[in-house]
Image: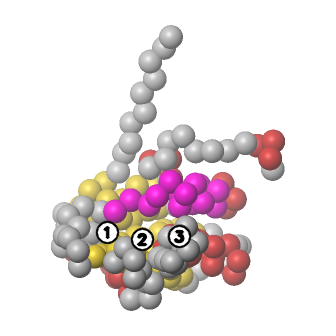
Amino acid sequence: MTKQEIKIAFEQYGSLAELNTTDQNLCLEAVKAMANSHSPYSKFKVGAALRLQSGKIILGSNQENVAYPSGLCAERVALFHWGASYPNDPIETIAVTAHTDNFEIIKPVTPCGSCLQVMAEYEKKQGKPIKVILYCKDGPVWIATGIESFLPFLFFEDRLS
């Protein structure tokens, strides 16, 4: 038996003001995306914004459905829109933020495992990592490059390709 260890690395900023203007603007686009959240059941709004290599911004928001689990997370809404419409314009950065009136969110909300797996698939497809910015209004911002920082045991089976 051998013991293995995985370390996760990310940058933490105290607020949005500490980021460069480009990243600040992407976070604010994610906030705008939350306005289109359809979350009548959880009351938990999530917004995502992708910045493509061309500079184009794609927005996504969570879309719930009474026939749970027929809804979709904000990240996958944005990512699938990219995959269907702009697959040859690589994703450089994704910003994600969340809000609810039910409680105070004091740290960034991380994407779920399904969203991380989709991000990983698109990283592999485009042959380069995606910068991930997790933004918490009035709180810290976490930034990591590459999905393995959040999901170290990615599911890939090359024989399925």
Residue behind mark 2: 95
Total marks shown come to 3
Q: CA distance from mark 1 to mark 2?
A: 7 Å
Q: Earlier in the sequence, mark 1 or mark 2?
A: 2
**What residue span does the magenta drawing correspond to?**
109-122
Residue 145 is covered by the magenta coloring: no
The image position of residue 31, as x and y in percent, is 35, 82
Furthest-top residue in view?
1
User: Which amino acid lies under the numbered mark 2 shown in the image of this protein?
Assistant: Ala
Which residue, given by chain and number where applicable, does mark 3 sit on? 68
The CA distance from mark 3 to mark 2 is 25 Å
Up-down relation of residue 13 to residue 82 (above or below): above
Find residue 132 and report its horizontal and vertical position in percent.
44, 62
Q: Is residue 123 above or below residue 20?
A: above
Bin the neighbour count of mark 3 within 10 Å (Cα to Cα): few under 14, some 14-19, many 20 and up.
few
Q: Which residue is mark 1?
A: 135
Q: Amino acid at mark 1?
A: Tyr
Where residue 115 sits: x, y (%)? 53, 61
Q: Residue at x 76, y 43 (%)?
A: 158
Q: Residue at x 24, y 61 (%)?
A: 107
Sequence-earlier tag: 1 or 3? 3
